[in-house]
Amino acid sequence: EGAINRIAAGEVVERPASAVKELVENALDAGARRVTIDIADGGKTLIRVTDDGCGIAGHDLALALSRHATSKIDGSDLLNIHTFGFRGEALPSLGAVGRLSISSRVPGADAYQIKVEGGAMGTVRPVALNAGTVVTLGDLFYATPARLKFMRTDRAEAQAITDIIKRLAMAEPFVRFELRDISNDSPRTVFVAEAQSGDMFDALHGRLATVLGREFADNALAIDAERDGLHLTGYAALPTYSRGSAVAQYLFVNGRPVRDKLLVGALRGAYFDFLSRDRHPAAALFLDCDPTLVDVNVHPAKSEVRFRDPALARGLIVSALRHALAGAGH
Ligand code: ADP
Ligand code: MG
């Protein structure tokens, strides 16, 4: 029915942070273990994402830039998506709004580069590169002054990029992330998350300490609950470690970062008796289920979801968190 229409809709790139999100998701889809993000001027003049993933073969570079070309799904299995990307829209969109350059190398082959400007593709040329992929996006929206006007200060855009990187880092604790600001001559590391090891709970706990602080991680309650095919795992803060801002809420559905009203509301509901109005619970929670039980394509930016049974999702979160809080003496 509507699945095709829903995923075809909408522009992918609204601001530097949305470009960064698409590029880092591509690196993760490529199986990268290390992702480095360099930005200048809040990402407005430069975004560069370097990964050690599988790379793109020279003869596939032009294809990767064509609209609706994706190597990740064959069209028959839209409900069964295990990668971040599947629409084949990000690279062509980025090539239309900035100066895009992709250099890539697959193991055992030579490295190649292609550039796109104003949507016009250059030729594929040999380039020097060790392994993986480097995507550079320069002068975002240079050809569309109307869009440029809507960008916020460098600082605000850089903050939005940091926020996206932290969300993706929380989703992928086994991957190393580094965000650098190279606006000036002396590059500055903004955020580093070393690759974690152990099982998923160990890795997530280590990543929590990096993103939200050691004190938070050491006082967080482990959550592990299941109901009717929905599985909830992660960590939730004791009420005393909850914050005055909503920034410390990291919610994922089938591995994708989401900012869903239903889930945020459920989290609030679970803490209702313990928190005053202006304090928000801090948590990193992963809801996993069969892909047929949830539609992650409601919004093109993929941050909203639609559950087949919303009451089930809400009920699971509220009861699992209340149970954990009660066990901790609350
Ligand atoms: P999608 O992610 O939806 O498939 P994109 O436009 O983001 O669409 O990317 C198009 C294709 O380019 C991908 O399907 C993938 O084959 C290839 N690609 C993009 N970025 C990378 C990367 N960093 N490493 C390996 N392949 C990549
Ligand atoms: Mg993609």
Image (cartoon, helix red, strand yellow):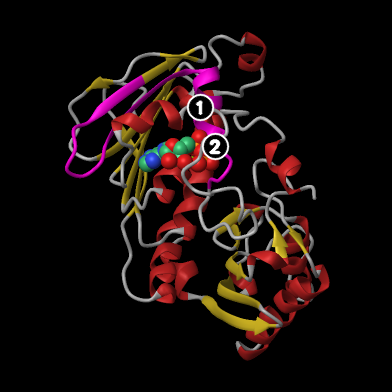
Judging depth in this view, the residue of 166 and 14 nearest the camera is 14
Stretch of the chain drawn in magenta: 85-114
> Is residue 21 visible in this depiction of the protein?
no
The residue carrying mark 2 is: 88
Q: Secondary structure at mark 1?
A: loop
| 29 drawn magenta | no
Judging depth in this view, the residue of 316 and 156 nearest the camera is 316
Q: Amino acid at mark 2?
A: Gly
Q: Residue placed at 63% from the left, 70% from the top?
A: 290
Q: Does 148 appear above or below 83? A: above
Query: Which quadrant would residue 121 be assigned to in this image?
Result: top left
The residue carrying mark 1 is: 66
Q: Amino acid at mark 1?
A: Ser
Q: Residue placed at 58% from the left, 67% from the top?
A: 286
| 86 drawn magenta | yes
**Residue 147: horizontal and vertical position, in percent?**
65, 17
> Is residue 42 visible in this depiction of the protein?
yes
**Chain-order first, disc 2 or disc 1:** 1
Left or right: where does residue 222 sit relative to residue 307? left
Cβ atoms at labels 2 and 1 below 8 Å apart: yes
Q: Is mark 1 within 8 Å of ligand 1?
A: no
Q: Residue placed at 65% from the left, 58% from the top?
A: 79
Query: Which quadrant would residue 115 be assigned to in this image?
Result: top left
